Amino acid sequence: MSVWKCPVCGTFMQHRGRCWSCTKGHTFDMARSGYVNLLPANRKHAKNSGDNAVMMRARRKFLDAGHYAPLRNALEQAALRYGRAGGVLLDAGCGEGYYTEGVAKALEQGNMPMQIYGVDISKSAADAASKRCPDGHFAVGSVYHLPVTDHCCDLLMTIFAPYCGEEYRRVLRKNGVMMMVIPGQQHLWGLKEAIYDVPYPNAVRDYALEGFELIQAEYVDSWLKLDNPEDIQNLFQMTPYYYKTGREEHARLEQLQSLSTQISFEVLQYRVVDAGE
């Protein structure tokens, strides 16, 4: 049974052929790759919301090269600790599905297969995730208005995505677990040194979140040595720094033949404490 809900009226949706429809007759066509667009026009902030094609392409190439494999491995192990065979996992802000795919495969191999769902505001991301994880269910939607029914998810992942605690508490079951990834203080310090005259550390955020109990905080720290200018450009283009800098900073990166940088992630695992049954 699907967990999608109608973004117009909030009622349960069913899959019929190449479309999804609700009990009140609202219908949403599936794309050829399998995702469905559940983002109402009045909730779009731009014509093409979310990550653009340049960022998507760069991130896909960079991640597929295995540079962030330590983070993917940490998420896989966390999912195996908290997953439930036959349960529902939602990746809120799933991007192109790199981490979704890794976790889904780990659960399958661990004899703990779950129903996999992903939501992203970018059509390009939902399309790529559907192709990467053909057994999953993906939709274009906002994490601030998830097109997902109440208290249906056992696990929720949010990786470098906007945080909406109210929605995450709404969709998680009682005792459901949220796995959140945020950058560590020194994440991509070497890249920042190459871009900025005075680099700055990432801000430290408070772990306390309303309605959630912190179970565990894991730190994933490693070093990248990039000897390929294409890898350096892909890393740069998949970060916000590419869009927050100008020609001078871009020129600096274009001249680099190699780059060493720290990568640092915090994998925070929370249990919801005020969800319904």
Image (cartoon, grey):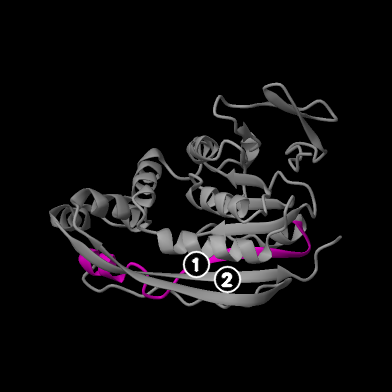
User: At 60% from the left edge and 52% from the top edge, which residue is drawn?
Assistant: 91
Name the amino acid type tagged 2: Leu
Question: Is residue 11 found inside the magenta-colored segment of the image?
Answer: no
Question: Is residue 183 found inside the magenta-colored segment of the image?
Answer: yes
Q: Is residue 239 above or below residue 213?
A: above
Range shown magenta:
172-195
The percent position of residue 181, horizontal first and vertical second, equals: 52, 65
In the image: residue 70, left or right of residue 5: left
Under circle 2, the secondary element is strand
Q: Is residue 47 above or below residue 209?
A: above
Q: Earlier in the sequence, mark 1 or mark 2?
A: 1
In the image: residue 74, left or right of residue 109: left
User: At 33% from the left edge and 57% from the top edge, which residue is drawn?
Assistant: 244
Picture quadrant where residue 256 is located: bottom left
Q: How many marks?
A: 2
Quarter in which the N terminus is drawn: top right
Residue 268: image tag: 2
Pointer 1: what residue? Answer: 182
Name the amino acid type tagged 1: Ile
Marks 1 and 2 sit apart, C-alpha to C-alpha, by 8 Å
Are discs 1 and 2 less than 8 Å apart at CB?
A: yes
Under circle 1, the secondary element is strand
